[in-house]
Structure formats: C-alpha cells, structure tokens
Image: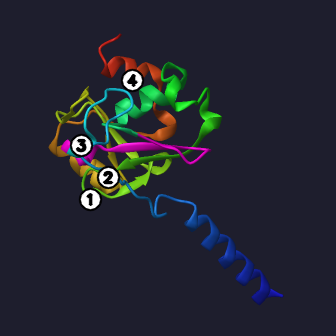
Amino acid sequence: MKKLSHIILASCLFCTVGVSASESYTMNFDKDTRGLVRKLAIYKDPAWACKIITKENKEFFFISPKSLMEFYYKPYKWPSANIETFDGIKEIVVTDYKTLKPIDAKYAFFIYGSRKISFAGDDLVAFENINDAKEFMKNNNGRRILKFSELSEGLIQLLNGDI
C-alpha cells in the first residue's frame, strides 16, 4: 500500500510539472506579421513578441507584453479578433527576453519600470526564470517584478501615460 501511495504521489507531481511554463510554445511570424494593437512589424524586435491564441485557434500577435495586455483587458476594442471577454482566449504567449524562447505568460515574471523600452514605449519585460528577472532588474534599474496575476489595467494605463 505504501508503494502504491508513492506511485500516485509521483504521478501527481509529474502532472503538475507538465502544466507550467515549460510547455513548448512557438512564435511563428514573418516579415508581414503585424501587431494587432499598434500595427507594427513583429520581426523588427522579436525579444518583445507576444501572441494570444483564441479558443478557435486563431493567433493574434503583439509587439510587446504591454500591447498584449491592452488587448487582454479590452478585447472588444479590436472587433476583428472576435473576442468579447477573457473566456475567448485559449493561450497567452510572451517571449523570454533573455533566451528569446516563447513561454506561457501566466507563469512569466514581468519587470516593471526598467530603462529598456519596446516600440510601444515603457513596457513590461518578460522572463521565465525568476533569477533572470532579478538579474535584469538589477542591471536595468527595474522597479518591481510582477507575476501575470499581479498585472492590471491600471498599470497598463500608467505605462501608456494615461494616468
């Protein structure tokens, strides 16, 4: 019985590891791919590239995490996406700034207030690894590390200079 409980525990741990930022994502764009919010070419700065995949498996790209979050909080402003609420979104993918690897935004660490800016201006720099985020923050005068759940519409308005 003890052996069976260890096998079950190990299986559960394996399952939770599978639901993380380590899942394999792609960021397939070309020179013609433009961001949904700002209409700028994604390929010009791939370290900032992001995308949302809808429940219908449509992909919409963004030039930066800030632009992605603008869409995330008010998707109805872009009727071509045909998304009214968060429920229409299947996946949110950002690029790890250090490794350029596409990662799940919900497990990423975002740096607020650094001196690095995207084509969208003041922005959020995404990392998969907390230690990479801390190192970047230290080297680039970042003000705070935030998880996806800590991002807010107000923060995006602040980054855009609307507040």
Residue 144 in the figure: left or right of residue 83: left
Q: Earlier in the sequence, mark 2 or mark 3?
A: 2
Q: Residues within 10 Å of mark 3 (few under 14, many from 20)?
A: many
* Residue 83 x/y as whole percent: 58, 30
As measured in the structure, the alpha-carbon distance from the residue carrying label 1 to the one carrying label 2 is 6 Å
Q: Considering the numbered disc 1 on the image, is that residue within a helix, a strand or a loop? A: loop
Q: Residue furthest right?
A: 1
Tell me where the magenta segment starts and ends, as one range.
44-60
Which quadrant of the rendered structure holds the N terminus? Answer: bottom right
Q: Residues within 10 Å of mark 1 (few under 14, many from 20)?
A: few
Q: Is residue 76 above or below residue 50?
A: above
Q: Are marks 1 and 2 in contact (CB under 8 Å)?
A: yes
Label 2 is placed on what type of residue? Answer: Asp
Q: Confirm whether the magenta stretch covers residue 47.
A: yes
Image disc number at residue 156: 4
* Residue 23 x/y as whole percent: 49, 63
Label 4 is placed on what type of residue? Answer: Ile
* Residue 22 x/y as whole percent: 46, 64
Q: What's the residue at 68%, 71% (across, down)?
A: 12
Label 1 is placed on what type of residue? Answer: Thr
Label 3 is placed on what type of residue? Answer: Met
Q: Residue furthest front?
A: 32
Q: Nearer the viewer's eye, disc 2 or disc 3?
A: 2
As measured in the structure, the alpha-carbon distance from the residue carrying label 3 to the one carrying label 4 is 19 Å
Residue 36 in the figure: left or right of residue 10: left
Image disc number at residue 96: 2
Task: Please give the count of numbered marks on the rendered protein.
Answer: 4
Q: Earlier in the sequence, mark 4 or mark 1?
A: 1
Q: Which residue is mark 3?
A: 137
Image disc number at residue 99: 1
Q: Is residue 47 above or below residue 88?
A: below
